[in-house]
Amino acid sequence: MKQIKAFLDKIVPISDLDWDFFTSKLQPRVFPKKSVFLKAGDIENHISFIESGAVRLYIPKEDPDKEITFGFSFKDEFVSAYDSFLTRTPSAYQLQALTGTKMLSITYADLQLVYKKTQLGNLIGRLTAERLYLIKSKREQNLLNLTAEERYLNLFKERPKLLKEIPLKYISSYIGVTSQALSRIRKRL
């Protein structure tokens, strides 16, 4: 609870009453390494704050080597299949714990109560939406404007912990190249 409080306190002061109500709705969840905790076709029912671990967002394929990784979330970040969460429709992608992962989660129904009774809920919803939008927008721009090598270098510069914690096959998918092409890029650098 201290991590999420410290994270939110950086953005806006939170009254004790709002904080107590909000935390009464949080549920701790723990996922073992490599576990899929939201499957494609299921409706996302949580927004979660990662206390420890790493999560991959990906589109599954019959051949696991052809899966498309399009996002990662780490400690002190929010994660959700947010489009499914908002629209209450099945997710087109999956969420997987890449490491043992601990989260604090709030359900859709509980978040609606927090929205009604506090200002904190609106802040969390807005922050989650803004973060996910910025990550998506930047990735799309990078895919359209940069070479694979430039995308890799940017990733290395902007998110070095990603390169330390994530298998290269997921990184290659994330930057839009094959594992072999990523290997060649790494050899050139």
Image: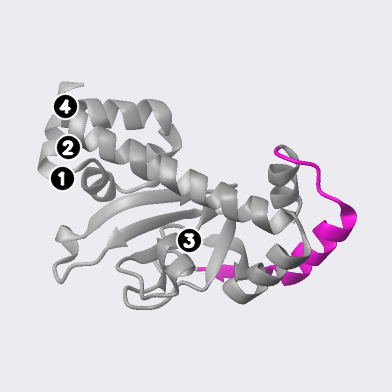
- Residue type indicated by callout 2: Leu
Q: Alpha-carbon neighbours of circle 1 within 10 Å: few (<14), some, or many (≥20)? A: some
Tell me which segment is drawn in magenta. 11-31
- The numbered disc on residue 182 is 2
Give the labeled residue for mark 3.
80
Rounded to the nearest whole Å, what is the CA distance between mark 4 and mark 2?
9 Å
Closer to viewer: mark 3 or mark 4: 3
Give the labeled residue for mark 1.
179
Instruction: Tell me the quadrant of the picture where the C terminus can be found.
Output: top left
Element type where label 3 sits in the image? loop
Residue 67 in the figure: left or right of residue 159: left
Rounded to the nearest whole Å, what is the CA distance between mark 1 and mark 2?
5 Å
**How many numbered tags mark residues here?**
4
Residue under the image location 54 percent in, 69 percent down: 46
Q: Nearer the viewer, residue 133 or 72?
A: 133
- The numbered disc on residue 51 is none
Q: Is residue 67 visible?
A: yes
Residue under the image location 36 percent in, 58 percent down: 57
Give the labeled residue for mark 4.
187
Element type where label 2 sits in the image? helix
